[in-house]
Image (tube, grey):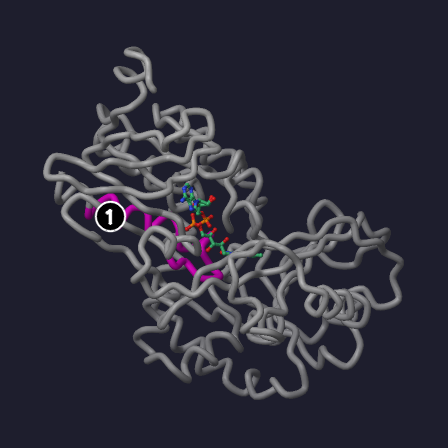
């Protein structure tokens, strides 16, 4: 039961957004810029944002050479180029919106470790550079034959290394704090611990039902329009959407004395990624070892993949170094039939942007702006 005051001040909004990840928060900012007088509310089920946006590796990435070559097996050159351009301009938008200092952006490029079975990628670098040059404006990829030994990588995996000049890194925590701060400074209201159980569209608006143990029944909020930015969790609200969850597991070490590399690294078509952060090594991936098992929204860890990550750390990345693993976690990405995110009007008053895949840091800002355009067309 709501009081008169709660009813008057807290139950009706012009626009409600479900999900406070990079997409939901950027969308709130985009809408506030277009409609400064609107009351906009973001509902987040976790006490913290509890999706991929606070669990990721902080790569400002657009695709490694082997990953792009792999995409070309199933996508046309135009589709690959369009996706690459969307990642590049999305990243630019994120940097312009929040500022490089606020997100700790580092334009250090990235490196891909090439295994013996992937040496074919080196033969195709000129082709890739030509393909991407309309977007990059020059060659993106080159073979780096000197840094590999200097970085100390070893074992049977790394036969060569490809440098990618387009990529960089951010500090994911700083980025999300900056985005929350920007949304709040513009007057966006954010409620955490607010899991939406369902919504109902009416002729004059949308009822949004939020789980509430205290009230007994679900708390009903009303709004004129609703945006769903729940990425991998969208099927619980929109069961017919083509969304397949894909869990990503990560570990991070204590600071490693004498760590010999900085920057961000990929290997095995982007299925593994590692970077230096605060003198530590963050390593994630291995989903390809058990695609079926990792198609889950359960945020626990699997022994198989954690053991594999430990092996890669020991044999490829930190060979001969002393280190200790300090933390492990998982987060859930969203995949589907294609690598394109879904941005759509679900109905007259309900909109959605979800399925951001493994490069949502680069994609989120543009996807959020595209969704705001759709809302603006109907408002
Ligand atoms: C381990 C890992 C590593 C990654 N590394 C990178 C990387 O290095 N670079 C990169 O570009 N991308 C990376 N990604 C992908 C990237 O993080 C995502 O694509 C991006 O964060 C998606 O943002 P989003 O806002 O769409 O979704 P999310 O961040 O998942 O946000 C969805 C939000 O909706 C909330 N929610 C869900 N259901 C409800 C409900 N019913 N009611 C209220 N709230 C709800 C969730 O709690 C969540 O906060 C990685 C992902 C993972 C998991």
6 or 372: which is nearer to us?
6
Q: Residue at x 26, y 15 (%)?
A: 8
Image quarter of the N terminus: top left
Q: Position of residue 366 (x, y in %)?
A: 33, 51
Residue position for label 1: 351
Q: Is residue 175 magenta?
A: no
Seen in the image, is 53 located left or right of residue 73? right
Position above or below: 339 against 172: below
Q: Which residue is drawn at 51% across and 38% down?
A: 46
Q: Where is residue 99 in the image (x, y as percent from the top left)?
A: 47, 38
User: Regarding mark 1 in the picture, which secondary structure is present there?
Assistant: strand
Position above or below: 115 against 224: below
For residue 94, which quarter of the picture? top left
Q: Which residue is drawn at 59% across and 69% down?
A: 287
Other residues around mark 1 within 10 Å, as few (<14) / some (14–19) / many (≥20): many
Position above or below: 99 against 74: above
Q: Where is residue 294 in the image (x, y as percent from the top left)?
A: 56, 67
The majority secondary structure of the magenta stretch comes to: helix
Image quarter of the C terminus: top left
110 or 291: which is nearer to us?
291
Residue span colored magenta: 355-374
Q: Does the magenta stretch include residue 371?
A: yes
Q: Where is residue 354 in the image (x, y as percent from the top left)?
A: 36, 55
């Amino acid at each position: 039961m709501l009081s008169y005051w709660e009813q008057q001040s807290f139950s009706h909004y012009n626009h409600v957004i479900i999900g406070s990840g990079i997409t939901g928060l950027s969308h709130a900012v985009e809408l506030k810029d277009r409609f400064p007088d609107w009351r906009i509310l973001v509902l987040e089920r976790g006490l913290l944002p509890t999706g991929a946006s606070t669990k990721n590796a902080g790569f400002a990435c657009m695709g490694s050479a082997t990953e792009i070559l792999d995409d070309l097996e199933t996508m046309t050159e135009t589709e690959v180029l369009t996706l690459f351009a969307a990642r590049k301009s999305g990243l630019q938008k994120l940097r312009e919106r929040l500022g490089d200092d606020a997100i700790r952006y580092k334009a250090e490029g990235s490196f891909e470790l090439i295994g013996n079975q992937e040496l074919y990628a080196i033969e195709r670098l000129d082709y890739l550079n030509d393909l991407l040059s309309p977007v990059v404006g020059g060659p993106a990829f080159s073979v780096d034959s000197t840094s590999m030994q200097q970085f100390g990588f070893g074992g049977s995996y790394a036969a060569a290394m490809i440098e990618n000049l387009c990529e960089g890194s951010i500090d994911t925590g700083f980025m999300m704090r900056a985005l929350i701060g920007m949304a709040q400074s513009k007057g966006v209201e954010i409620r955490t611990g607010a899991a939406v159980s369902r919504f109902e569209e009416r002729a004059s608006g949308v009822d949004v039902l939020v789980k509430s143990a205290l009230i007994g029944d679900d708390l009903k909020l009303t709004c004129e329009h609703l945006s769903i930015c729940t990425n991998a969790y969208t099927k619980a609200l929109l069961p017919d959407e083509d969304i397949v969850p894909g869990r990503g597991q990560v570990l991070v070490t204590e600071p490693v004395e004498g760590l010999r590399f900085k920057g961000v690294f990929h290997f095995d078509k982007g299925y593994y990624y590692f970077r230096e952060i605060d003198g530590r090594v963050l390593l994630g991936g291995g989903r390809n070892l058990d695609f079926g098992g990792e198609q889950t929204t359960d945020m626990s860890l699997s022994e198989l993949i954690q053991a594999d990550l430990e092996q890669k750390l020991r044999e490829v990345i930190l060979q001969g170094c002393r280190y200790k693993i300090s933390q492990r976690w998982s987060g859930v990405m969203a995949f589907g039939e294609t690598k394109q995110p879904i941005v759509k009007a679900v109905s007259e008053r309900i909109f959605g942007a979800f399925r951001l895949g493994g490069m949502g840091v680069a994609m989120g800002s543009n996807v959020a702006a595209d969704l705001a355009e759709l809302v603006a067309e109907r408002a």
